Image: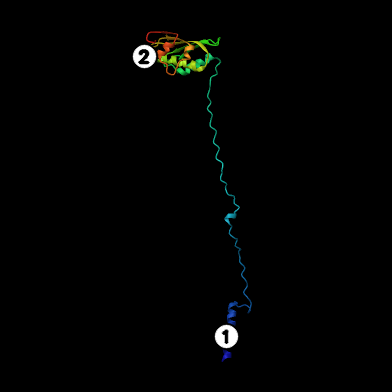
Amino acid sequence: MWLVAGVAVVVLGVVAVLALGGGGSPGTAPPAVTPSATLSPASDPSTSTEATPTEATSEPTASATPTEVVETEEVSSNEEMLDLLFQDVLGPSNRGVDRVSSVKLDESSNAGDLMATWAINRNSTAAKLKSGAWGDVRKILAVVQDSGVPVGKITLVGTYAEGAGKDSQVLKTIFSWAKVKKLDLGSASPSSLTATADAVQAQAGWR
């Protein structure tokens, strides 16, 4: 009875071994399966050799700003310089004539005489005409005062024309430099200029 049971156990063991062995020889292990592909390790982003764009640290260079060229007129004498300065300070004529028609400076001596002739601008009333004319005198004297040009006697002749007539002298003033250099020409009135002048010749309404 025990013998039969033992034989049965042995038989079952043999069957199990055959089943696991896939029908091969007893005691022979199944062949090892060789992997068909080898997995490569994932690359570490921190060790990547790919070039990283470098952000520019220098600021773009600003384009050069065009330099404004200021044209200046060359002058060959004090007379020419004063002529240009008078034209600049008086501005253009509103009557279609030359605002400054003549400038003469005797440069044969250290302090030569100066004579300038200018056209008085048109204005709406007689009072404004007179005020404008004396305002021109003040501006011209201020230019002489600031220029540093040595002068002696200063003669200023103002011209005017009614309508389409030809300009004629309506105001003539004569100043000595010794008096002009002491004047405050920033606020000098027509009356103070008249009092300072060595001589004033004026048509009616212009004095």
Q: Nearer the viewer, residue 202 or 168?
A: 202
Q: Residues within 10 Å of mark 1 (few under 14, many from 20)?
A: few
Q: Residues within 10 Å of mark 2 (few under 14, many from 20)?
A: few
| Earlier-in-chain disc, 1 versus 2 | 1
Name which residue lies at 57% across and 90% down: 2
Left or right? Give the position of 157 relative to 34.
left
Residue 18 is labelled as: none
Q: Nearer the viewer, residue 197 or 63?
A: 197
Element on which disc 1 rests:
helix
Name which residue lies at 47% across and 13% down: 180
Q: Which residue carries the number 2 mark?
A: 127
Name which residue lies at 58% across and 77% down: 20
Q: CA distance from mark 1 to mark 2?
A: 149 Å
Q: Amino acid at mark 1?
A: Val
Quarter occupied by residue 1: bottom right
Q: Which residue carries the number 1 mark?
A: 9
Query: Could you tell me residue 149's position as x and y percent?
Result: 52, 15
